[in-house]
Image: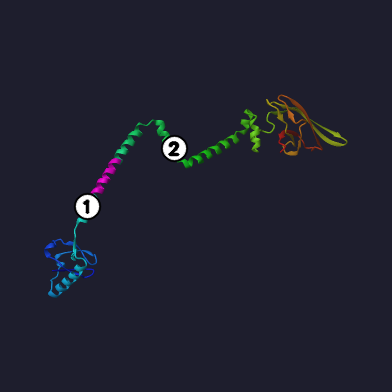
C-alpha cells in the first residue's frame, strides 16, 4: 500500500499492519512533515507507481546507503515524555508548596512567641516606612524642621530661662525678646504749660528694670488720646540712658509741643528701634 506525504506528495510503500486502528504519527523523510495517518490514508499500489517509488528509493539510497527512505513513525514517546515532565513538575511544585508551608508555620510560631514591644516596633516600622533606608533621611529632615519650628514658637520662654540663647536667635534674624519686657513706668505725671506763648505737654516719671539681668532700653512710645481713646498724637523718644541694671530705675522726661486741646489720656509703651 502507498502512503503520500500531505505536504510534498512523496509516496511511500507502507505495510498496513504497522498502522494501528487509532492511527500513528508519521514523518516524511523528504520534507520532514509530521502528520497522523490512519489506514484510510493508504492507497492501492499500481505497478507503474511502484516502479517510480522504487526508483526514487533506489536513487536516494545511493546517497544515503545507511538510511531507508520511509515515513518514520513519530512514536508517542514525546507524549510519554511530556507526561513524565508533567509528573516531575508536579512533584517539584508539591515539594515547593510543602517547604513554603513549613516556613510559614515556623514564621507563625516565631511571631506568636515574640515579645509585645518587638511586635509594636515592627508594626511602627512597617506603617511609617522606616524599614526602608531611603525614607529615613526624609524623616530626620522632617524631625529637624519640626524641632526648629518648635524652638521658634517658644523663643520668648527660652530666652527668659536662658538669656544667652538670645544671641542664637539674633544671629538667625529672629526677635526673641518681648520689647520692654520687665520694664515698668512708675510715678508718671503730666503737666501742661506755656513757654514763649507755645503750649506744651510734659510727661515725666521713672523707668524701672524688674529683670534679673541688664536690659537695653528701647524707644519710649507715647500716644496722646482723647476721651474716646482715639489717638490724637504719637511720638517716639529715646530713653535717657542705653542700658539699665537689674532693679535699677531711671528718670525720663518727654515734652510734646502744641498738644491737642482734646487730649485726655496718655499711653506709654516701648518700641524697638528697628
Q: Is residue 244 left or right of residue 60?
A: right
Q: Is residue 68 above or below residue 219?
A: below
State which quadrant residue 239 falls in.
Answer: top right
Q: Position of residue 89 (x, y in %)?
A: 26, 48
Q: Secondary structure at mark 1?
A: helix
For the point 46% across and 40% down, the residue is 133
Q: Bounds of the magenta span?
A: 87-99
In-front residue for pair 153/226? 153
> Relative to residue 110, is residue 25 drawn left or right?
left
Residue 4 vs 223, above or below: the answer is: below
Residue 11 versus residue 7: which sits nearer the camera? 11
CB under 8 Å between discs 1 and 2: no
Q: Nearer the viewer, residue 62 or 21?
A: 62
Magenta residue check for 96: yes
- What's the residue at 41%, 32% (across, down)? 118
- Residue 125 is labelled as 2
Q: Is residue 241 left or right of residue 181?
A: right
Q: Name the quadrant containing residue 215.
A: top right
Question: For the residue labelled by badge 2, is the local secondary structure a helix, a strand or a loop?
Answer: helix
**Tag 1 residue:** 83
Horizontal and vertical percent for residue 107?
34, 36
Give the label, 1 or 2, closer to the camera. 1
- Which of 138 and 196 lies nearest the eye of the viewer? 138
Amino acid at each position: 500500500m502507498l502512503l503520500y506525504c500531505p505536504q510534498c506528495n512523496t509516496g511511500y510503500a507502507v505495510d498496513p499492519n504497522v498502522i494501528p486502528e487509532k492511527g500513528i504519527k508519521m514523518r516524511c523523510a523528504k520534507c520532514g512533515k509530521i502528520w497522523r495517518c490512519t489506514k484510510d490514508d493508504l492507497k492501492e499500489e499500481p505497478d507503474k507507481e511502484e516502479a517510480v517509488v522504487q526508483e526514487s528509493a533506489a536513487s536516494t539510497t545511493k546517497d544515503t546507503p545507511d538510511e531507508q527512505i520511509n515515513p518514520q513513525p513519530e512514536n508517542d514517546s514525546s507524549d510519554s515524555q511530556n507526561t513524565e515532565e508533567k509528573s516531575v513538575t508536579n512533584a517539584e511544585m508539591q515539594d515547593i508548596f510543602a517547604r513554603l508551608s513549613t516556613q510559614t508555620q515556623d514564621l507563625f510560631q516565631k511571631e506568636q512567641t515574640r515579645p509585645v514591644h518587638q511586635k509594636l516596633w515592627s508594626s511602627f516600622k512597617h506603617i511609617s516606612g522606616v524599614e526602608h533606608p531611603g525614607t529615613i533621611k526624609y524623616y530626620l529632615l522632617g524631625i529637624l524642621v519640626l524641632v526648629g519650628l518648635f524652638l521658634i514658637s517658644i523663643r520668648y520662654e527660652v530666652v527668659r530661662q536662658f538669656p544667652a540663647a538670645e544671641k542664637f536667635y539674633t544671629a538667625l534674624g529672629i526677635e526673641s525678646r518681648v520689647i520692654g519686657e520687665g520694664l515698668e513706668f512708675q510715678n508718671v505725671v503730666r503737666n501742661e504749660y506755656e513757654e514763649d506763648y507755645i503750649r506744651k505737654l510734659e510727661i515725666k516719671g521713672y523707668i524701672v528694670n524688674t529683670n534679673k539681668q541688664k536690659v537695653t532700653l528701647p524707644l519710649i512710645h507715647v500716644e496722646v488720646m482723647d476721651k474716646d481713646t482715639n489717638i490724637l498724637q504719637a511720638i517716639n523718644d529715646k530713653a535717657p540712658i542705653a542700658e539699665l541694671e537689674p532693679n535699677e530705675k531711671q528718670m525720663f522726661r518727654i515734652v510734646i509741643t502744641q498738644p491737642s486741646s482734646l487730649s485726655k489720656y496718655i499711653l506709654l509703651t516701648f518700641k524697638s528701634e528697628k
